Image (tube, rainbow, N blue to C red):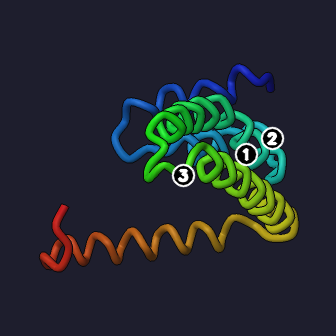
Amino acid sequence: MGHGERGLPPGVAMPAEHARRSGATMSTALVLDPNRVAATRLSFFLGIPTLTGAGLYELRDALGSEAGGAGPMPPIVGTAVSFVIAYASIAWLLRCVARRSFNVFVIYRITVGALLLALLGTGVLAA
């Protein structure tokens, strides 16, 4: 299947509350081509424009404020360190997905979701 079909579900899911771009992208990519690594990689590639734009917007604000007179170096160093950590995290996740199925992630999401619903239902957490 073409890349156009893989890009449609995240666009449709965007207005839906609680729908996640990466989940919709990976689910659709897996239906079209059951390669977990390719599906995960596509999900990250589709996020690059949004994350880059948001990062540049925030960096612009951070450089403009120069909190405490520290100058532009703290935001620049923070952005560089964040990039390195994010790159390493994505590389780790791709290796993990290549070796294991998504079942661990599915169980985690269902467990955390059920726990949050229980905490909200009992009033321990407020929405």
Q: Residue at x 81, y 41 (%)?
A: 33
Which residue in the structure is indicated by mark 2? Answer: 33
- Label 2 crowd (10 A; few <14 / some 14-19 / many >=20): few
Q: Residue at x 38, y 30 (%)?
A: 15
Query: Residue 36: horizontal and vertical position, in percent?
Result: 79, 53
Mark 1 and mark 2 in contact? Answer it, CB < 8 Å.
yes
Place residue 45 in its image quadrant: top right
Mark 1 and mark 3 in contact? Answer it, CB < 8 Å.
no
Identity, as a three-letter code, of the amino acid under mark 3: Ala
- Label 3 crowd (10 A; few <14 / some 14-19 / many >=20): few
Which residue in the structure is indicated by mark 3? Answer: 70
| Residue at the extreme left | 123
Q: Nearer the viewer, residue 115 or 27?
A: 115
Element type where label 2 sits in the image: loop
Q: Residue at x 19, y 61 (%)?
A: 127
Q: Nearer the viewer, residue 53 or 100?
A: 53
Q: Nearer the viewer, residue 67 or 94?
A: 67
Vertical placement of residue 117 versus 14, above or below: below
Q: Earlier in the sequence, mark 1 or mark 3?
A: 1
